């Protein structure tokens, strides 16, 4: 059986189109027109990926994502007609793994989904545990610990931290971090990394208020001390 994808969108025509497209590629699909029915199902079974609209009645996509991230790091991709840059930045800052604008190219959408799954699977193929200077990263479970306290990271955030940590003291450009977390075939704006980094720092500070291991170097990028 293929990987399971949950679709959440109040536009039934979009749900029908996406369901047919994904099922033709071998994915198992379940669709929901609003957040409440989605969470009723989500509590019983977790998918491998979630495609989520932002503008929905009742519970918005942003609110759905916030609730998902309270308990899960499952990859979430926004597929939405909202085009404001602020919406995209907010989505990434809350833990979205990708953002695709409607109307979308079916080929591009499938490529982004496949790239996201490859990123996840690629982590599993590498050595499972990284430990250094108080940081522990379990690549098999995607768990992160700082000074023996768990830091709840999304898949994308986990890979950004791993990229920095594997070469502590070495500056990583935004392009380096994009390739490590999204893959070379995916275009992502540089500012997306800044949004991720802001959220990563916040999460580490939640378990250690003195955390300052991630340095910003103006015009260069970031490094883990």
Image (cartoon, helix red, strand yellow):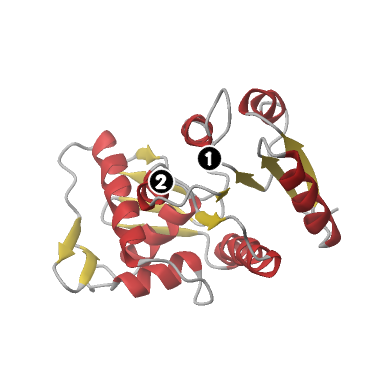
Disc with the residue nearer the chain's start (1 vs 2): 1
Disc 1/disc 2 C-alpha distance (Å): 9 Å
x and y percentages locating residue 1 in the rendered image: 86, 53
Mark 1–mark 2 CB contact (< 8 Å): yes
Q: Report if residue 138 is visible in the image.
A: yes
x and y percentages locating residue 156 in the rendered image: 46, 56
Q: Crowdedness of circle 1 by 10 Å Cα count: few (<14), some, many (20+)?
A: many
| Disc 2: which residue | 87
Q: Crowdedness of circle 2 by 10 Å Cα count: few (<14), some, many (20+)?
A: some
Q: Residue at x 78, y 56 (%)?
A: 22
Where is 119 relative to 15, above or below? Answer: below
Residue 54 disc label: 1
- In the picture, the quarter occupied by the C terminus is bottom left
User: Dividing the picture into quarters, in which one does residue 178 lie?
Assistant: bottom left
Q: Report if residue 169 is visible in the image.
A: no
Query: In front: 69, or 98?
Result: 98
- Relative side of 203 to 26, left or right: left
For label 1, the SS is loop
Query: In front: 115, or 124?
Result: 115
Where is 189 relative to 50, above or below? Answer: below
User: Dividing the picture into quarters, in which one does residue 90 lie?
Assistant: top left
For label 2, the SS is helix
x and y percentages locating residue 45 in the rendered image: 72, 33
Q: Residue at x 17, y 60 (%)?
A: 215
- Relative side of 27 to 118, left or right: right
Most distant residue in the bottom direction: 184
């Amino acid at each position: 059986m293929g990987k399971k994808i949950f679709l959440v969108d109040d536009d039934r025509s979009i749900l029908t189109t996406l369901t047919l497209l994904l099922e033709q590629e071998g994915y198992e699909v379940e669709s929901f027109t609003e957040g409440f029915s989605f969470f009723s199902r989500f509590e019983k079974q977790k998918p491998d990926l979630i495609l989520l609209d932002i503008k929905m009645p009742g519970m918005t996509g942003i609110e759905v994502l916030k609730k998902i991230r309270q308990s899960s790091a499952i990859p979430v991709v926004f597929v939405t007609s909202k085009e404001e840059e602020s919406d995209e930045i907010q989505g990434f800052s809350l833990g979205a793994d990708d953002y695709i604008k409607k109307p979308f190219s079916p080929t591009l959408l499938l490529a982004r989904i496949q790239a996201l799954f490859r990123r996840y699977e690629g982590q599993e193929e590498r050595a499972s545990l990284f430990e250094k200077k108080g940081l522990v990263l379990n690549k098999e479970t995607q768990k992160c610990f700082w000074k023996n306290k768990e830091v709840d990271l999304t898949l994308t955030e986990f890979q950004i931290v791993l990229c920095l940590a594997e070469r502590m003291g070495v500056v990583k450009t935004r392009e380096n971090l994009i390739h490590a977390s999204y893959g070379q075939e995916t275009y992502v704006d540089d500012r997306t990394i800044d949004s991720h980094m802001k959220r990563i720092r916040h999460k580490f500070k939640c378990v250690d208020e003195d955390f300052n291991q991630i340095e910003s170097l103006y015009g260069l990028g970031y490094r883990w001390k």
